[in-house]
Image (tube, rainbow, N blue to C red):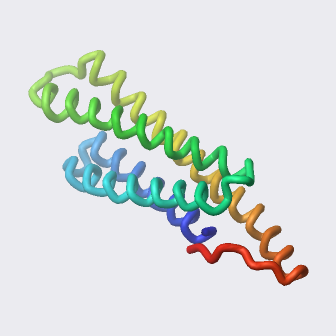
């Protein structure tokens, strides 16, 4: 599980870099959008795994729910940003207020998503190390997770 939460942090960070390169004309929109599908899959997988195995641990449950919520918001904002910048604003001389606001909101939620995945990874390391130590001392079994 610790590896999966670390992967989540890394893939969100890469996605933010791809978004920045697209936003500042360093590349086309396709890599950012294609990677968004991968990011969505990994974040949902990570959150569902955390909620399935460790929902009784509030320190893991809360950031996992937050990550899931932010993924939904981010997808909606990403779609709106795509429409305003690529579809509707492709020939715009100046950015429209809707283009700017949707892009800023999409960027801000992306930063919140990165922060939330970092918190989830820290909490996973913190809580799962305690569970491992307890299992070693008592001989108890805990679910095997990635």
Can you give x and y, in whole percent of width and height, for residue 137 in the image? 90, 81
Q: Which quarter of the image is occupied by the N terminus?
A: bottom right
* Residue farthest to the left, as pictured: 91
- The residue shown at (24%, 18%) is 96
Front residue of this view, candidates 19 and 3 = 3
Q: Is residue 88 above or below residue 70?
A: above
- Asked if 122 appears above or below 144 in the picture, the reply is above
Above or below, 24 against 2 in this view is: above
> Percent x, y for residue 24?
30, 41
Q: Is residue 30 left or right of residue 130?
A: left
Residue ID at (34%, 26%): 102
Give 56 or 58, whichever is nearer the viewer.
56
User: Residue 111, how many percent across, how many down?
Assistant: 51, 41
On screen, residue 87 versus residue 64, left or right, reads left
Q: Residue extending furthest top?
A: 97
Q: Quadrant of the C terminus?
A: bottom right
- For this view, does 78 lie left or right of residue 124? left
Up/down of 56 relative to 143, above or below? above
Taking the spot 33% from the left edge, 52% from the top edge, the residue there is 36
Q: Residue at x 42, y 57 (%)?
A: 14
- Name the residue nearer the viewer: 103 or 58: 58
- Residue 90: image x %, image y %? 12, 31
């Amino acid at each position: 599980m610790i590896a999966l939460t670390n992967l989540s942090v890394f893939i969100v960070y890469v996605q933010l870099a791809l978004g920045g390169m697209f936003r500042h004309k360093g590349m086309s929109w396709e890599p950012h959008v294609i990677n968004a599908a991968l990011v969505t899959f990994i974040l949902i997988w990570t959150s569902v795994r955390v909620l399935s195995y460790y929902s009784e641990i509030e320190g893991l449950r809360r950031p996992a729910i937050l990550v899931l919520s932010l993924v939904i918001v981010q997808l909606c904002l990403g779609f709106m940003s795509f429409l305003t910048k690529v579809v509707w604003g492709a020939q715009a001389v100046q950015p429209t207020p809707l283009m700017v606001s949707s892009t800023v909101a999409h960027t801000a939620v992306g930063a919140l998503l990165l922060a939330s995945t970092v918190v989830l990874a820290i909490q996973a390391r913190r809580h799962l190390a305690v569970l491992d130590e307890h299992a070693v001392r008592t001989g108890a079994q805990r679910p095997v997770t990635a």
